[in-house]
Amino acid sequence: MGVAEQLTRGRSIVRGRIDVLLVTLLVVLLGVDLLGQLVGGALGFPFLASVFLEGLVVGLAYGLAGIGLSMTYSILNFANFAHGDTVTVGAFAGWSTAYVLGGLGTAGVGSLFLLGGSPSISVLSAFGVVVIGALTAGASGAALSLALDRVVYRPMRSADGISLLIASIGVALGLRYLIAFVYGTDVRGVTAPVSKLGLFRLEGVTGIGLIRPGQRVGELAGAGELPFFLPVGAGGTGSEVLVSLTLHGVALAIAASGLMLGVHLLLQRTKLGTAMRAMADNKPLARVTGIPTERVIRATWIVGGALTGIAGFLIVLERGTMSFTFGWLLLLFIFSAVILGGIGSIYGAMAGGIIIGLVDSMAIIWLPSSLTKAAAFAVLILVLIVRPDGLFGGVTTA
Amino acid sequence: MSSADSSLPGVGRLRATLTSVFAGHDGRMIAGTMGGIYLLLILVGLLAGFDAGGVVNTLRAATVYAAGYGMLVLALNLHWGYTGLFNIGVAGFMAVGTYTTAILSAAPSTEPGFGLGLPLGVAVIGGMLAAALLGVLTALPALRLRADYLAIVTVALSEIIRLGIKSRPLAEFTLLGTTVGTGGGRGISYPAPNRFGSWALETVPGGGAVYDVGAAVGVARPVIEGVVYMFLLIASAAAFWVFLVRVGNSPFGRVLKAIREDELVASSLGKDTRRFKLIVFAVGCALMGLAGYLWLGRSGFVNDLSFRPNITFFVFVALIIGGAGSNTGSILGGMVFSSVLFYFPQFVSQNFSPGGVAPRNFVAALDGVGAFGAYALQNISAIRFMLIGIVLVYLMQNRPQGLLGHRTESAAAIDLLDRDAGMRADGGAPDTASRPDRQGEDGE
């Protein structure tokens, strides 16, 4: 009997690990194939670097947007399907504010509020307006989350996770079509073209530089035409872009990293953060310890909602376009990020976001472009089936 | 004051009458609800100045929606209502069923899309089998997941399917020497289910006479053909209902309910709950695939945009309205959702235009009540979806069991409490007041 027990246990361990083993094998194989393609010349370094960088930046945004989802998922124990539409509301509120401030005097306030007119807004031309827009987006996300909690979720505090999930689907529909009702259903471009920061080679000189929207590396008369160029080395011939990223992408990366650091400090250094972690871990125990659970839940919505709204604003800043469904379409990516990193883990959400961003952008090396999103969703399904606690083994940090 | 007082017993009597007429009689409830919806549509149609043909066409359109949603809700009820499987990938399973049927039945030279030109019967069965197979493949690894994880897996899967349909490799490929494909973003054309009307009237002897009768009362030929197709949908929905009621009342169905209530108990009584869940998933997905072809693909053309996740959530809202776990509730939910929440607002905005030009945008609409009303009527589809969301939240807060959910369903084939009518199969209760357990709480 003891032997049989041992055997079944051993078998289940092996079976549990076979899944993980297969996935690891797949990742290693893809890595080897990538190296082979790179060495064999089938894949150029500039292309690889650009998809990598794009994935990294988009992934940071997924991670930032995922923090709020992860917090409410672990503390209130439900998958919030309205999270994507909170991203949308934050983005629209932030950009309306930015348009009204940036275009004051050029068009009517009403028209600017509806993102009409063309007050050329970019981080270079209107840095202050962009910052105020991002802050407004955060404030709107927090206010919206608080209001929704008060009206929708608080009366259902004792309900199970699935009831809350279904209610959040209703909230998602309501928010999305409220935006459609106010702003219409067009996809609109909101940002002005902006310079790119990158690593260039100009006639054999490699350097870090800034290039204006209209300029092309091959057509430059010399480095003097660039707003900024810092040679770092020589080698190779001709002129090309090795890696580049728009300043909006840079702004997104800096802001997202800064906010993530802020969340880390909040969770680790403040009493509120400790209380949040305690609630995520064991709610009844937190309550008997004297943690004011309702107040912590409100704080969670505020922090999560603010980060979500800012994430929405920054994603639009980087992409340049938005429509009433853009947050909804991001929801599955955000879910992927959160689940990949382990629900409740803030650091997991950040790491998961970056991995999902990289999968989405780098899958183009192996798959047709129409299937890269499907690859990201496939990773989500795979993780849920093979390792539902997330890549990092369900170590919750918050 | 006194008039209000005197009317109170009247209200009570009306309530009692309605309860005695409808409660416990599922057929009457369905007929009564549909009758009410028809009455509303006829009144509004007459207000808009419709002739007989217009009214018939309106009722036909509403019924097609109701039957289509009814089928889908019934299939989802088998998953969520009976077995507690939180499947929100309905759109994906519909897509697989519809596309398989489409590819199998479309003529080889069809553009867009490429088909095999098989007989329709084979194609429909093939579509159901494909959806069922996908259901099994999904369920095999996914069934051990928590409910919320299963939800995310299924919704992600439905998006993967949709993206796959749109992708280039599947748009056109060679299978055993024949070119087939989904047509990618251009969609696929195939023999349309709603051509059933003209086919039936031409094939059945005396079918031509129906056209003459229609012409005499002012109903055009396409409307008549649409009505015949509508009857096909009603028949399918009725078949779904009969099948699922029988499944629900069978020993198999009792195990499903046991799994929903407490899976541990069911498995400790020696039931292989995994196998039961697999079968249920396959059967429900096959039904979704069939409903997808018959209803969503009724015009003979679909593309990937037909299967966006929204349709899944609409089916879910309809199920919640009707009440998870009740087949009759599923039909009622499908009717109420599709006719009242989905079709009616659109119908109103199409047929009643306010005087003057509606404001261009939201800010202009804030000018006054009239301007806002005109803007709202013009953008009624957005308001409709907001309303659907609000209804869903309201129901989850106040009536999570829906109209008819959580009815106590007797485990025994014969109701042991009902000694008088014990032999009656469907247990039409003679005295509902004494048997509150069999009574829908909102039966009226």
Image (spheres, rainbow, N blue to C red):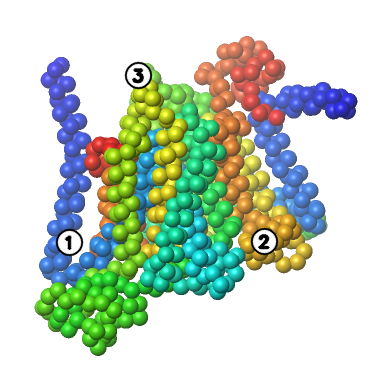
Residue A379's x, y, as percent?
29, 49
- Viewer-proximal residue, B207 or A319? A319
Pointer 2: residues within 10 angstroms few (<14), some, or many (20+)? some
Q: Secondary structure at mark 2?
A: helix
Using residue A151 as the reference point, say whether residue B15 is left or right of it: right
- Label 1 resides on the chain identified as A
Residue type, mark 1 in image: Leu
Q: Which residue is rendered at x = 10% and y = 78% of the image?
A: A235
Q: Nearer the viewer, mark 3 or mark 1?
A: 1
Q: For numbered disc 3, what is the local secondary structure? A: helix
Q: Is residue B415 above or below residue A284?
A: above
The residue singled out by tag 2 in the image is B365
Amino acid, disc 2: Ala
Viewer-side label of 3, 2? 2
Q: Which residue is mark 1?
A: A34
Please tell me which residue is depicted at 19% across the width and 45% down the height of the picture.
Answer: A22
Give the class, few, some or many, for how many residues have Cα within 10 Å of label 3's Cα (few <14, many ≥20).
Answer: few
Which residue does the numbered mark 3 point to in the structure image? Answer: B268
- Name the image quarter holding the N terminus of chain A: top left
